[in-house]
Image: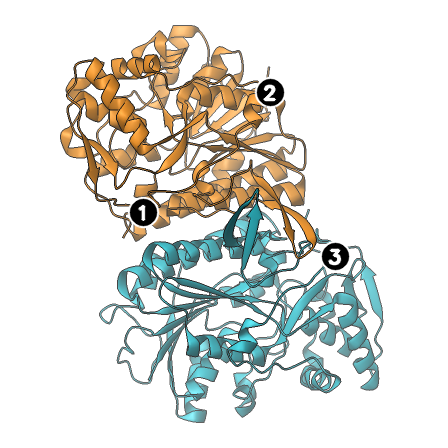
Chain colours: A cyan, B orange
Amino acid sequence: MSHILILGGDGYLGWPTAMYFSARGYDVTVVDNYFRRNACTELDTGMLYPVPTLIERAKIWHTTTGKEVKVVIGDLTEPELMRSLFDQAKIRYAWAQDETFSGLPDTVVHYAEQPSAPYSVMNYRRADVTLTNNLRTTNNLMWAVRDMSRHTHIIKLGTMGEYGTPNIDIEEGWIDIEHKGRNGRFLFPRQGGSLYHTTKIMDTDLLWLGVRMWDLKVTDLMQGPVYGIETEESKLDARLNTLFNYDEIFGTIINRFITQAVIGYPLTVYGGGGQTRGYLHIKDTLQCIHMAERTSAEAGELRIFNQFMETFSANDIAALTKKIGKERGHDVAIDHLENPRKEMEEHYYNPVHKGLIEIGVEPHYLTDEAMHGLFEVVERYKGNIRNDVIFRGIKWD
Amino acid sequence: MSHILILGGDGYLGWPTAMYFSARGYDVTVVDNYFRRNACTELDTGMLYPVPTLIERAKIWHTTTGKEVKVVIGDLTEPELMRSLFDQAKIRYAWAQDETFSGLPDTVVHYAEQPSAPYSVMNYRRADVTLTNNLRTTNNLMWAVRDMSRHTHIIKLGTMGEYGTPNIDIEEGWIDIEHKGRNGRFLFPRQGGSLYHTTKIMDTDLLWLGVRMWDLKVTDLMQGPVYGIETEESKLDARLNTLFNYDEIFGTIINRFITQAVIGYPLTVYGGGGQTRGYLHIKDTLQCIHMAERTSAEAGELRIFNQFMETFSANDIAALTKKIGKERGHDVAIDHLENPRKEMEEHYYNPVHKGLIEIGVEPHYLTDEAMHGLFEVVERYKGNIRNDVIFRGIKWD
């Protein structure tokens, strides 16, 4: 069976991905250094509910399903730790039911990044941490695959935020430019709205180098903001739920708004609220990764997909949250805060997103029914929600 | 008088820049951690002649001219060291005639990078060092200026290698793209041919973020390969000559070919030799920096210049070196080695380079007379040239 290695396996997407593939019979190894949890603790961001450690979750998963997720705890900015994952003699499991090496991975899913835009611009130290973590990890991965396992398919999570909000249609990764009577094909021009987004652009550039120089196989998924908690696998045991942030630093907008609605906190729309992005349900992230894994990029190919299912403005999401919240008896107001970010509040936005559908992804949409489902989960934990962490106004400047 | 801070002040361009501005009455502070020298020692690359330490050179400069270049020795990947340069209470000079703080810099010239493409792809450790050194230093600089000295103009050395060799004309940094009936202005698309070149692209992206988010003033000089040793200032004392590498790792092509010609080593053209680049004399680097410093970018402007004076193919340079070498009595052959790099050996190349001329730079060209001058300096040190370091075939793969 295929062996899949998940970097950042303790994160919001990492753990659900690990269970998803394990449930389908894959050999799964996860790696994490608890960066995200530690940052949440340090910043006192709160979480919707406590989450067992990665090792504890692997054990619960094993007890519940009889299946194994092997766990390595370590910092992937260290080249030697990264390389140990590709080396039977050097890999060290923090937990595994069976410590036999699963072999070189057929696929690596790379989530091991500091994923928050506000965190990345809080101050110079966190900027340095973001840059160092994200770039070194990607570079170490590229070199490990180059040196030790060239058949491995790298699936790297990018972000739609790499493109920013240009005045032209956003293509899927590439653009043909005609200029002064000549033609060329280029990576679509990108400019990030935070240091975090800029590191994601750099990740793409690094892996594009690896593809051109060493014929690596890379799929880059330009993902929009994800919403949701539950997946098929997490429903087996509430302790298997993924970590859920609802604060301004690590929470994503739909998750934040629903949490705010549940406790009667006015929805925190930034500025005018015309900021438009492409969204997807966490179950669709799993589907996208799965379809990317099944089809693979070719050797020497950087395959790019825009990973979202539908676009909404912040105002659209606020209005929908208010409507569903009211139906469920919540008192929902909408606030327009002075925008702490530097971003356009009204802009053109027309990104292509065909590729993942073409390889078999079947989208979920943010229907009223889906929203009711999201509310229902958050409501279960209403007593845990802390008012004081929802918005503290981390400014870009 | 203006205060100019030179990061990487011990390097091939850093030290001549320091003397150039000091001679013209500027307050000059240089910073270096001897990374380049140490790498040369570690890799046994040889140098054309021994070079006194940065502190020794500052003292020689002071004795010779009565002028002062203040010296800080330290690693700029450390945020605290970078920030100390902007803080009267924290700066620590390794040498200064007068230890009074020169004040916040009006201009920072950022050369503090691992500058070798072959070094950057030798192995995973050197790749990690290159990435970490170049990106952290640039990011630390950006944050120090953001937090402590927003009026400071940052002049960052980029490279023409950021653009690669696209099939369309290379503009000066920016391109207007019409796409599906809409228009946008973007950074010119870039793709580097090594990890080093990729880090330079990332530097540009980082500073472009700083310009958009915090209204920093940035000039980015996309420089071609530089040749030459002597400047007006170095002629005062041979011990003031800049460090000169002629090996394949740190030597630039014209300097390497002349050195090879002087000892009768067949010129090391890689592959077909049609690789075309834009070149400039080291004196023109100094002029370009000076004109960029005098004119400055505006707050919120990323000003980009393509910094070279004329284009040549590797074959052009080999032919010219052979011709001048023969006139000087050297026995010069041309070898076409199997190309250790991954690059196009025949390609379109038509880069714009108008901006620096418009702000007052008066180009030097690689005339026969100029070539004779370059040969003359290298011939003085003929006895020091080591055959064994000229080519060892560091492969991209």
Q: CA distance from mark 3 to mark 2?
A: 37 Å
Dot 3 alpha-carbon crowd within 10 angstroms: few under 14, some 14 to 19, many 20 or more: few
Residue wearing tag 3: A347
- Determine the image quadrant of residue B155: top right
Judged by depth in the image, the label closer to the viewer, 3 or 2, is 3
Quadrant that contains the N terminus of chain B: top right
Residue wearing tag 1: B126
Mark 2 residue type: Arg
Residue at the spot 58% in from the left edge and 83% down from the top edge: A362
Residue A276 placed where, x, y %? 72, 64
Q: Is residue B105 visible?
A: no
Badge 3 marks a residue whose secondary structure is: loop
**Are the residues under marks 2 and 1 on the same chain?**
yes
Drawn side of residue A81 relative to residue A254, left or right = left
Disc number at residue B294? 2
User: How many numbered dots are placed on residues in this image?
Assistant: 3
Of residues A110 and B335, the one drawn nearer to the viewer in this rendering: B335
Judged by depth in the image, the label closer to the viewer, 3 or 1, is 3
